[in-house]
Image: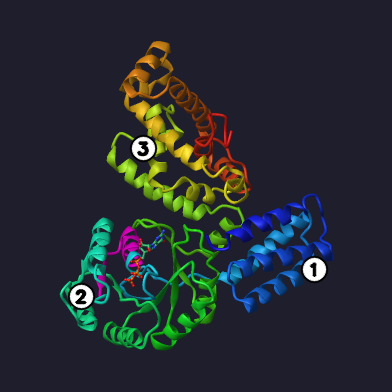
Amino acid sequence: MVLDDLGSSLRGTLDTLQGKSRLSEDDVEEIVKEIQRSLLSADVDVSLVMELSDAIETRALEEEPPGGTTARDHVLKIVYEELVDLVGDSTELPLESQTILLAGLQGSGKTTSAAKMAWWFSKKGLRPAVIQTDTFRPGAYDQAKQMCERAEVEFYGDPDGEDPVQIARDGLEATADADVHIVDTAGRHALEDDLIAEIEAIETAVDPDRSLLVLDAAIGQGAKEQARQFERSIGIEGVVITKLDGTAKGGGALTAVNETDSSIAFLGTGETVQDIERFEPSGFISRLLGMGDLKQLSERVERAMAETGGEDEDWDPEDLLEGSFTLKDMQKQMETMNKMGPLDQVMDMIPGMGGGMMDQLPDDAMDVTQNRMRDFEVAMDSMTDEELENPRIIGQSRVERIVRGSGIEEETVRELLEQHKMMERTISQFQGMGDGDMQRMMKKLEQGGGGGGLGGMMGGGKGPFG
Ligand SMILES: Nc1nc2c(ncn2[C@@H]2O[C@H](COP(=O)(O)OP(=O)(O)OP(=O)(O)O)[C@@H](O)[C@H]2O)c(=O)[nH]1
């Protein structure tokens, strides 16, 4: 993901400041060098890098750390603030009726992003429609239609149409009842004159409230020229950076933002329609620096809760804080987690568990965890309602029956029961807490305490990463 290397190398450098209360010039020089190296290797424009590193250097040397602040925290705060400043605010996107035009080169992810954005607006309670005007790439129509079906949003396209401008006009008319119109356009391998002429004509026809440039995170310095041309022809209000789930560097996209004097609107983090995040500078940089992103996490939890809770009227997540924590509750929690997306993305958002901690995990740790969760679910499917409600009654003979019924190894079934006990203990600590206690607990989490719950799922019932 963008500047990923910056996060881990910076953490390493900052760790050498542990215990110091003041920064020396050498310390600052070392940190600034590390930041420059990471940003340049992530394809961030040289002048941007110099601007940022100068600002960090000046502030780190001149600003007095507030009393009681360690040198490490002081410099971390400065780096955080300057990076937030570098990536800029997110593109303004009022939750109201609007027309959005998507532009970009072939394969940048426009069609995928159109469906994802429509899904995102639909989750915000608006009625979106995607209009596909790509008459250039065979297959674009079917792809857009299928993705919109998956996103459960309205779609307009004309597989036999030859004039993209006419399709755009017809599309706006046919979907007049929708609030948000997202107009997808054709891409080309390179910025050719006919692509520019076509998109200008579409822009004139649909008169969008905002035009967004879709950029693959893998784009390097080429982003600059591309951004400049699109800016000149249609005006760019925001950038959508796609494929951030890959190994791409992302620095080129930051350059494009700077070049068009625009901002980042959305981040694409996978191939399915839900893999989209609204760009939030502070959360994004926190995550990058391994400080978690509570806002994205709570959005995901809420969405997943709405989906899992909605299917089962007997289950209310709030009950967790009252009655006993049963295996059924645990099963629901696991379903919720599955709906939240890949575990590594989720863990990155948990304060104290992202960044540095993730780096220490072996690459296959996440697969193991996903497999473990699947095994747990299969084992639970072989339990009776009585056992799920009251796991304490599960003795040796019941364990043997579950093993026979599910085909899951006895050791795994026992691990599941252990895991449940551990989570039950954690939940019981939350029970009976007042709001003030809750806030203190959240604060502790923000400062890096793990705890049971989600983290407890990671290890063999021995706590986070055990
Ligand atoms: N991993 C990953 N893949 C993505 C993401 N966004 C798009 N893709 C993939 O990138 C490829 C190209 O995406 P499209 O949406 O077809 O790109 P496009 O810009 O519409 O392409 P044209 O219509 O040819 O201009 C597809 O295989 C998508 O599945 C993302 O955020 N992550």
Residue 275 in the image: state x and y as whole percent: 39, 57
- Badge 1 crowding class, 10 Å Cα cut-off, few under 14, some 14 to 19, many 20 or more, is some
Number of residues whose C-alpha sits closer than 10 Å to that of mark 3, classed few (under 14), some (14–19) or many (20 or more) = some
Using the numbered discs, state the Cα–Cα distance from disc 3 to disc 2 in whole angstroms. 42 Å
* Residue at image mark 1: 61
**Residue 281 sits in which quadrant?**
bottom right
Q: Which residues are magenta?
A: 113-133
Q: To which residue does mark 3 refer?
A: 316
Q: Which mark is residue 171?
A: 2
Q: Which mark is residue 379?
A: none
Q: CA distance from mark 2 to mark 1?
A: 57 Å
* Nearest-to-viewer mark from 3 and 1: 1
The picture quadrant where one finds residue 284 is bottom right
Residue type at numbered disc 2: Gly
Q: Amino acid at mark 3?
A: Asp
Q: Percent from the top left, x then y, of residue 382?
A: 32, 23
User: Quick one: which residue is furthest to the left in this view?
Assistant: 160
- Count of numbered circles on the image: 3
Residue drawn 28% across and 37% down?
Answer: 313
Q: Position of residue 305 (x, y in %)?
A: 37, 44
Answer with left or right where residue 462 lies relative to residue 322. right
- Magenta span includes 300: no
